[in-house]
Amino acid sequence: MTKILLIEDEQIMLDLLRRKLTEEGYEVFVAKDGEEGLKVMAEINPDIILLDIIMPRKGGFEVMEEMQKDPNLKRIPVIIISNSGQPVELSRAQKLGAKDWLIKTEFDPQEVINKVKKQLWQKQS
Amino acid sequence: MFSYNFYLNIFLIFLIILLFIFYQRKVNDLKKAYEEVEVILAIRTKARTRALNELARSLEEKVKRRTKELEESRIALMGTLEDVEDARKIAEGEKDKTLSIITNFSDGLLFFDKENKLSLINPQAEKLFDIKNQNTIGKSVSELESFGNLNLLVKTIGNEIKEISKKELLLDSLTLEVSTISIIKGDEKTGILVILHDITREKTIEKLKTEFVSLSAHQLRTPLSAIKWTLKMLLDGDLGEITKEQKEYISKTYQSNERMIDLINDLLNITRIEEGKYLFNPVLSDFQEIVQLAISSSEDIIQKRKIKLKFEKPEKKLPKVKIDKEKIELVIQNLLTNALIYTSPGGEIIISLKNSEEGIEFKISDTGIGIPKIQQERVFTKFFRGSNAMRVDTGGTGLGLYISKNIIEAHNGKIWFESKEGNGTTFYFTLPCGKRLLKNSEVL
């Protein structure tokens, strides 16, 4: 089963995405901040990560920086789900290896699923 | 008879009488002559005296007149001298006034003479550059570099002292606005005035405001996305079956939420414009393609509103333009959406492109409600909405054209319009290409 790790501090977004992704048949793991996220990903080795940027304790950029240092974690595709989409942030995320970027107000859960599918498909081929 | 003597005596007496008479007559004659002479003399004397008198009088008059003239000249001269003295006093007073204004002026002031040597500096400027009681007068611009922080000013104004207007200069924790003004008398340049205006407070407030709006907009987006996602999942049936009526209400709520998101996005765009970091990574792009894309993405609403849209493509292919694609798309989208919303069904919109002197020119005309003449001046201001536009659509934010203008101007382009209420509106904008291409240095 495809494992997805959701790192997001907003409970309702977490619930909604978990529900949607579970319905799609994925095995969903969640973490409520960056630090917890890093711990969980080391344990479960997910196929893909959905990552928020602004979070308590450790933010999304720091999570990606730490992932870059670890050859195992570095390989996992990351899709950013954020409230903001400033061009400077986008380019920073790209440099840190993010595969895609979603602004929450501009996308809905179904579109998130589509992005996830696309990334997983690209990873396989 | 009578004797001879007697006769002789009588004769003698007679003779004497005759002589006496003769003498008397002669005397009388003489007297008369004398009197006549006297009269003549008197007359002559009188005449001479009169002439003399007249001469004397005329001389006297002449003297008097001259004296008067001299007196008048003297008074006039004195007056002139007094005037000069007064003028000198006034000039001195004015000079004192000017000096005291310069000394007590809250802005820093420096005056350089025509050889670019410092001839005046006020205490505020000395304080700003930390050069109190230092002998800076008479020094050239390059010599001044070694005094206090003046090197920072020299860097801003240059050794030749360029004409600059409101250029910002960071000085420790202060932000100064530097302007230079050439002082010209007649045709000759007598020097240049450098004005330093402290705008630290304005900058701080502006920054706080921008940060506040930016932060609150981000904070507002979080719950709005939660609402959006929940409603969307409800509508899609992901959270269980809902009735038709429930679906309708949720759908309307979803639309309201979308409007709120648009408003917040516009607010964020504004703060980003005001922070000056709006243009990102301009690349050479095919402008016609961008316009085509914007039209395609509005296809639904064009059909729904039964509007005829004509896209008049240029005869010759347009040169590529260096633009921030995403922002230019936003401008076209804003103008197209406005045309679509404010044109009644059955109306017409024409979009055309051409290559002009100014670069590429985009034109969009509609047969819509137009903009009231009295409000036309405010069209590009923040939060402006036409009074007739508000009746047609209550949802607009009044930020689209403000943002568009800022984007076009950030590209060194121009945006303008022509409109008649009830007859329609035409918006134009140009984007420089070729030699006038956007320079990288103008982009953050």
Image: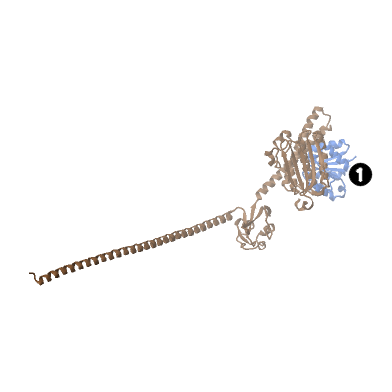
Q: Chain A appears in which tint?
A: blue
Q: Is residue B379 visible?
A: yes
In which chain is the residue bearing label 1? A
Rendered brown, the chain in question is B
| Residue positioned most to the left | B1
The correct choice, above or below, for A102 with respect to B62 in the image is above
Residue at 39% from the left image edge and 63% from the top image edge: B59
- Image x and y of residue A27, in percent: 87, 39
Nearest the eye: B132 or A73: B132
Q: Quadrant of the N terminus of chain B?
A: bottom left
- From the image, tell me which residue sits under label 1: A124
- Image x and y of residue A114, in percent: 86, 39
The correct choice, above or below, for B144 with respect to A74 in the image is below
- Image x and y of residue B17, in percent: 16, 67
| Mark 1 residue type | Gln
Q: Which of the colour schemes (rainbow, by chain, secondary structure, one colour) is used?
A: by chain
